[in-house]
Amino acid sequence: MSSIFSKIVKGDIPCYKIYEDENHLAFLDIQPLVMGHVLCIPKKEVDYLYDLTEDELASLWKFTMPVAKAIKQAVSCKRIGTAVIGLEVPHCHIHLLPLQHVGDINFSREKLHPSSEELADMATKIRSFI
């Protein structure tokens, strides 16, 4: 099932890329809950996280590790929160968010609208720790 994430993977839509390997891509959420909010996705088009094979699921979680560690170094925070919601875009994805408070991972709150420059700077900063 094609989605906006499929178009990002194909390069049809630009993104603020953080990290990538043969099977996965990490990029900034352009309407983050907090600055440094990253999405990690499989390049394979799969809507629901648990429709991945066991090996694909394990591989996706393993892929998040260096990304989460880089976010933690780049953004002052207590923890990196992890969420799998999967309702807005029909392509499985893992949210990684720098947290100061539990409310930082509340998906019902208003999202930020950072400028292109702010997003580019944040991507560069996070990438520098990978």
Image (tube, rainbow, N blue to C red):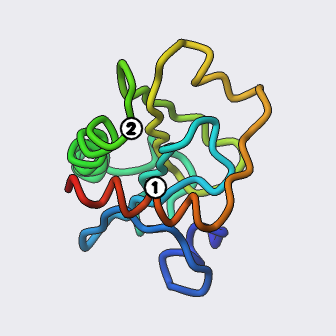
Residue 82 shown left or right of residue 60 in the figure:
right
Res. 84 mark = none
Q: Which residue is mark 2?
A: 75
Cα gap from disc 1 to disc 2, whole angstroms: 9 Å
Q: Looking at the image, is mark 1 or mark 2 earlier in the sequence?
A: 2
Considering only vertical position in the picture, is 75 above or below 122?
A: above
Marker count (numbered) = 2
- Front residue of 60 and 34: 34
Mark 1: few/some/many CA within 10 Å (<14, 14-19, 20+): many
Considering only vertical position in the picture, is 20 above or below 95?
A: below
Labelled pair 1, 2 in contact (Cβ < 8 Å) = yes
- Front residue of 20 and 61: 20
- Which quadrant would the C terminus be assigned to in this image? bottom left
The residue positioned 74% from the left and 39% from the top of the image is 111
- Which quadrant would the N terminus be assigned to in this image? bottom right
- Mark 2 lies on a secondary structure that is loop
Name the spot of residue 24 as percent of width and height, x first: 33, 63
The residue positioned 66% from the left and 68% from the top of the image is 3
Name the spot of residue 97 as percent of width and height, x first: 47, 34
Considering only vertical position in the picture, is 73 above or below 55?
A: above
Amino acid at the residue labelled 1: Met
Mark 2: few/some/many CA within 10 Å (<14, 14-19, 20+): some
Name the spot of residue 81 as percent of width and height, x first: 43, 26
Residue 108 shown left or right of residue 90 in the figure:
right
Q: Which residue is mark 1?
A: 122
Residue 115, by quadrant, is bottom right
- Mark 1 lies on a secondary structure that is helix
Residue 102, by quadrant, is top right
